[in-house]
């Protein structure tokens, strides 16, 4: 099974996110579907320091989250990616924890969604209308990963999108690795803008 290109692509994203300190405490995970074997995907190995580069950064799993021909253990949240790849044609799924997206998910947890508007970065979702709005769903965190993964299903209506998990980061997916990365970056920017603006208004 040849997945060199996918490995390089995912390694580049891991390096970029690590430089932004988006993998604190070994948190977060990345997944990329294999072009030649779309029923399989690369995913980050469990418990690894993602600021380091090793030959065991990723492993291949099937759509049930089971490792294929390796003794490495997949990330605990692999089932989130399994649901995304099973219910959409997305090629890449990315999950990171940051202060900004956790804070926003907590502020809007009762509403089960946060809506952004009047911000250029909404265009990352190919929304180009003037005065456009972007709503990101917020799902309840669950220690039981199959329960958490199942909560994604109602929101998997497009081959690109994002879900905030209450106090548990963001999962974003896209039709390409670049699109998924772009969505993570855009939502992170929107969350940071919201927090900064709310703080400044409070202090004025």
Image: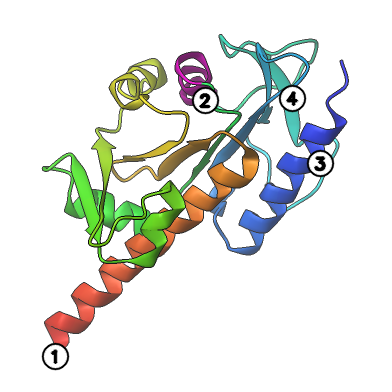
Q: In the displayed structure, would residue 182 be above or below residue 62?
A: below
Query: Gap between marks 2 and 4, in whole Å?
Result: 14 Å
Label 4 neighbour load within 10 Å: few <14, some 14-19, many 20+: many
Whether residue 98 is visible here, answered yes or no, is: no
SS of the residue under disc 1? loop
Residue at 17% over, 39% down = 112
In the rendering, at what x and y percent does residue 166 appear? 28, 41
SS of the residue under disc 4? strand
Instruction: Give the residue at mark 4.
Output: 59
Looking at the image, is mark 3 or mark 2 earlier in the sequence? 3
SS of the residue under disc 2? helix
Q: Nearer the viewer, residue 177 or 48?
A: 177
Q: Examine the structure image and report whether residue 80 is included in the region drawn in magenta.
A: yes
In the rendering, at what x and y percent does residue 128 appear? 36, 55
Instruction: Give the residue at mark 3.
Output: 8
Instruction: Give the residue at mark 2.
Output: 81
Looking at the image, is mark 2 or mark 4 earlier in the sequence? 4
Q: Are marks 3 and 2 in contact (CB under 8 Å)?
A: no
In the rendering, at what x and y percent does residue 89 appear? 53, 21
Looking at the image, is mark 2 or mark 1 earlier in the sequence? 2
Q: In the displayed structure, would residue 44 be above or below residue 66?
A: below
Query: Gap between marks 4 and 3, in whole Å?
Result: 13 Å
| Residue 78 appears left or right of 111 | right
Query: Gap between marks 2 and 1, in whole Å?
Result: 43 Å
The boundaries of the magenta stretch are: 77-88
Instruction: Give the residue at mark 1.
Output: 204
Q: Main secondary structure of the magenta part?
A: helix
| Residue 174 appears left or right of 129 | right
Q: Examine the structure image and report whether residue 120 is included in the region drawn in magenta.
A: no
Q: Nearer the viewer, mark 4 or mark 1?
A: 1
Q: Nearer the viewer, residue 44 or 112?
A: 112
């Amino acid at each position: 099974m040849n997945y060199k290109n996918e490995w390089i692509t995912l390694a580049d994203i891991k390096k970029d996110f690590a430089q932004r300190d988006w993998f604190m405490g070994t948190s977060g995970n990345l997944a990329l579907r294999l072009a030649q074997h779309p029923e399989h995907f690369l995913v980050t190995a469990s418990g690894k320091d993602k600021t380091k580069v090793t030959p065991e950064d990723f492993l291949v799993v099937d759509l049930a989250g089971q490792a294929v021909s390796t003794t490495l253990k997949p990330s605990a949240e692999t089932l989130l990616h399994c649901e995304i790849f099973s219910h959409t044609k997305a090629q890449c799924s990315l999950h990171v924890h940051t202060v900004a997206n956790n804070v926003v998910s907590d502020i809007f947890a009762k509403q089960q969604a946060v809506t952004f508007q009047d911000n250029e970065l909404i265009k990352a979702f190919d929304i180009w209308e003037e005065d456009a709005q972007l709503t990101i769903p917020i799902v309840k965190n669950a220690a039981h990963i199959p329960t958490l993964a199942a909560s994604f299903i109602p929101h998997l209506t497009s081959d690109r999108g994002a879900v905030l998990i209450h106090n548990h980061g963001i999962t974003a997916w896209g039709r390409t690795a670049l699109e998924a990365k772009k969505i993570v970056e855009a939502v992170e920017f929107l969350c940071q803008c919201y927090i900064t603006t709310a703080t400044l208004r409070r202090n004025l």
